[in-house]
Image (spheres, rainbow, N blue to C red):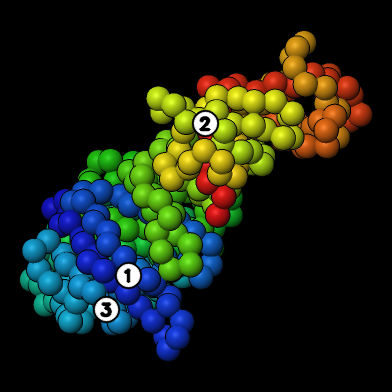
Amino acid sequence: MNRGLPLRFAAAAKSYGEVQALKPTDLEVRDGEFLTLLGPSGSGKTTLLNLAAGYLEPSGGRIFIGERDVTDLPARRRNIGMVFQNYALFPHMTVAGNVAYGLTVRRRPRDEIARRVAAALAMVRLEEYGSRRIQELSGGQQQRVALARAIVIEPDVLLMDEPLGALDKQLRRQVQLELRRLHEEHRRTTIYVTHDQEEALVLSDRVAVMRDGRIEQLGSASDLYDKPVNAFVAGFIGESNLLPAKVTSLEGGEANVAIGAFAQNATVPAADGLNPGDDALLLIRPEHVRIDREGLAAEITEVVYLGELTAFHLRLAGGATLWGRQITNQALQRGMPVKVSWERAAARIVPKD
């Protein structure tokens, strides 16, 4: 099976009257790449996906699959595979019949259909389930049937619209790993839509974080987590402590900042777009907060047992609050006075939204 072709949006936009569901957007999905569109409801991620699929007509811009301009082509002529949130499987057909459907409507020879259906079912580890009815399958198995039906036609681009939304948490995690394994073994150009940040980080080569019809940041999971471009991305990817700060000076790629909540100054890696005198936010991830013998005076106001980890909420003497997280320590208790510090090398300064 092929790797798929690159997909490119050139100033693609979609409006409904005065409402801009998607502002002019430039984006290239590389061939064989797994790219996730991540964002809250109304951010434009599903609109972008449906423009790629041909289910919506853009209000402006062009869309290319490989070198082919598909902007004006209907969905059936784009050679895309689609996995829907509700799977959209045919209950009156067997598993094999569902997987074969796309090849059947393309009038492929019977022996070719049988061969390709068998290969697709083996790819998703359902080779023994071809004769079963859809109602006899679990939710996770139905999701894999929907995936097999999408990939059996050898699409140039595979599109998935929150396909794990109906699964419980434990099964969802299992299927996430299965999807990742499948992509690593059979790399195919893929766009995946979700509002679940953990899902995006587990699955993706790159993630596009969206808000209000535009892409806020595009990058690898580590880039988004360690180097968010603004407070929205910092707050949407992972847990965050965001404290008011003011940039006092910039030098050699570092920013000197005054942190009012701590009544002290610090030097942290500089962020693009910040200048001396700007108000900003200091980002400290909970795993970088430390309870030490030396540090700022604080009180533990909440302790949350998470199994291997324990989360704790701190109130500093000046009134600022922080969340921390560490390997479970049964000694932590609500009301306990402590000293707190943070790993300065891991802190970041980000612009206010």
- Distance from Cα at disc 2 to Cα at disc 3: 42 Å
Q: Is residue 295 above or below residue 190?
A: above
Q: In this view, which residue lies farthest toward the bottom?
A: 17
For disc 1, the marked residue is 24
Q: Position of residue 257 (x, y in %)?
A: 59, 31
Q: Are marks 3 and 1 in contact (CB under 8 Å)?
A: yes
- Distance from Cα at disc 2 to Cα at disc 1: 35 Å
Q: Determine the residue positioned at 46% across, 82% down.
A: 19
Counting residues from the start of the chain, the first of labels 3 and 1 encountered is: 1
For disc 3, the marked residue is 60
Q: Determine the residue positioned at 48% across, 41% down.
A: 275
Under mark 3, the amino acid is Gly
For disc 2, the marked residue is 249
Under mark 2, the amino acid is Ser
Q: Position of residue 25 (x, y in %)?
A: 31, 65
Q: Residues within 10 Å of mark 3 (few under 14, many from 20)?
A: some
Q: In the structure shown, which secondary structural element does the residue marked by tag 1 occupy?
A: strand
Under mark 1, the amino acid is Pro
Q: In the structure shown, which secondary structural element does the residue marked by tag 3 occupy?
A: strand
Counting residues from the start of the chain, the first of labels 2 and 3 encountered is: 3
